[in-house]
Image (cartoon, rainbow, N blue to C red):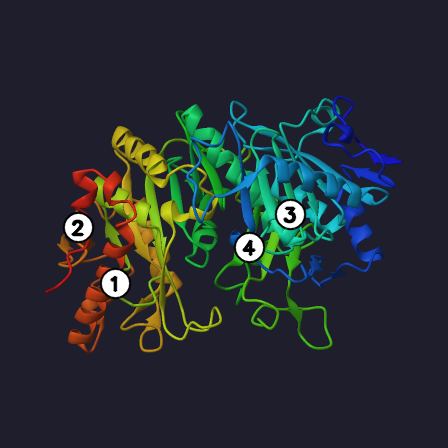
Amino acid sequence: MIVGNRSTKVGLDAVGIKNAACVYWNLTPAELLEHTIINGEGVMADSGAICVKTGEFTGRSPLDKFTVDDAITHDTVWWGEINQPYSAEKFDDLHQKILAYLQGRTLYVRDAFAGANPAYKINVRVVNENPWQNFFTYNMFIRPNAEEQTNFSPDWTILCAPGFYADSEIDETRQHNFTIVNFTKKLILIGGSAYTGEIKKGIFTVLNYELPFKGVLPMHCSANIGRENKDTAVFFGLSGTGKTTLSADPSRDLIGDDEHGWADTGVYNFEGGCYAKCINLSEENEPQIWNAIKFGAMVENIVFHEGTRSIDFSDISITQNTRVSYPIHHIKEAVHPSIGGIPKNVFFLTCDSFGVLPPISKLTAGQAMYQFISGYTAKVAGTEAGITEPKAVFSACFGAPFLPLHPTKYAEMLGEKINEHGVNVWLVNTGWTGGPYGVGSRMKLRYTRAMITAALNGELNDVEYTVDPVFGLRIPVEVPNVPAEVLIPRNTWEDKAAYDKKANYLAKLFNDNFELYKAYANEEILAAAPKQLV
């Protein structure tokens, strides 16, 4: 039985599904929420948002992601720990097992687009066994109209079966969960995990492979646009650095919070929604995200205040990675379509819990490439088992788990675009000041916003700069609405010798990490490396 508005061009038999008990096709959000509640898979918060638990996995599992090694990918993919090869034969075997598992089940299908720029969009079909996962795909991908649904033919298909567990010995997976991308068959298999982020990042991986061959730079970034000057700004950063928070600027219009492409005509959003972290979320600090959590939003792995349906955003008893997905139109200031011009400013966000990097600094082209390839941030104690002090994290291009090609490919593309358009590039530390985690304090969000606003408004163009002796970064000595004493990190530490030691330690971590890419870097990039103190 088929229910809903389905495509008349290509059906599920194209990927081998022929005997489902019932297929719900492109249901409305209200219908999917009804199914979720009736099935006992979610409850409604007092804000109107649906709340679900993703089960065993509350985050992505990058060690369980594989790419089929075949004629298309063998000589193009950057094989290694990030892109683990998987045989085409084993993929076919696993595909057949998932089809057998899905036989006789109720399925939910969503037809959608990835890419707001019509010249580069791809058609994506997602098949889910849970209505709330299908609701997630409705939020996160771009929604076709009725005519586009009727004439829909998928470029890529995702089969998402969280209830299917692989046999690791037979199926040659690491454990029972997996995400496997097949670029020849344009098919992604997801099993053993109900964490919704695997769906969106699966397609992001696809775009990271396909778009560079079309001259488009795929970016793990947020982006917004000025209301008056229509200037586009891009924010790169790993999870927890403020990428979503800082792009949700009440004075600017949002293009998107996570995934974008930079084409010859400008920047465009890959997605139709936002997937924001909501740990310690407050209306005061993040009003746009707070107000987006209403009917039509889905919150994952949260806990209610006792005896209420009010979400306790401070409760991390399930996970620190609590998330909310919502369609981008929940942000009043979002632009439609989600497209902007050539960026005027690019921000690299890092949460430096060592308290060493300046809160804002301006980068040369060489430094921009070095920092982009490094993709640095730091986790604080307590965020993961075994972390008892700040731990440096380097993720190439601020998104290594999603890069099928070598990082230098993306870095070269970014460098070319920065030089071609004279883009300002800034490194912004949203982490600690006055000492490392446990000694200093987190940089105030209002200061970070003020620094970014000053950069966007051109107020840092003519101020005096000083150069950090270790990292070579140009630091403004004054920024409107920011105390001067917080701008130079060494000055914020009571123990200057301790700062010097920690700066030297972080410089060594940078240099050690860059050994992976040194052979591919030009002299300009190599000259941007930190200078370790003797």
Q: Quadrant of residue 8?
A: top right
Judge depth for marks 1 and 2 and give the one in front.
Answer: 1
Q: Residues within 10 Å of mark 2 (few under 14, many from 20)?
A: few
> What residue is shown with label 1?
506
Question: Is 339 positioned to the left or the right of 21 in the image?
Answer: left
Q: Nearer the viewer, residue 529 or 181?
A: 181
> What residue is shown with label 3?
171
The reply to whether residue 328 is in sight is: no
Residue type, mark 2 in image: Val
Q: Nearer the viewer, residue 110 or 254?
A: 110
Residue type, mark 1 in image: Leu
Residue type, mark 4 in image: Ser
Judge depth for marks 4 and 3 and give the one in front.
Answer: 3
Query: At 60% across and 46% down in the image, what residue appears?
Result: 179
> What residue is shown with label 4?
61
Q: Which mark is residue 463?
A: 2
Residue 245, percent from left and from top: 46, 55
Residue 359, percent from left and from top: 28, 59
Q: Residue furthest front?
A: 170
Question: Is 504 positioned to the left or the right of 20 in the image?
Answer: left
Q: Nearer the viewer, residue 394 or 134?
A: 394
The earlier-in-sequence mark between 1 and 3 is 3
Alpha-carbon span between mark 3 and mark 2: 60 Å
Query: At 47% across and 32% down in the image, what residue appears?
Result: 74
The earlier-in-sequence mark between 3 and 2 is 3
Secondary structure under badge 3? helix
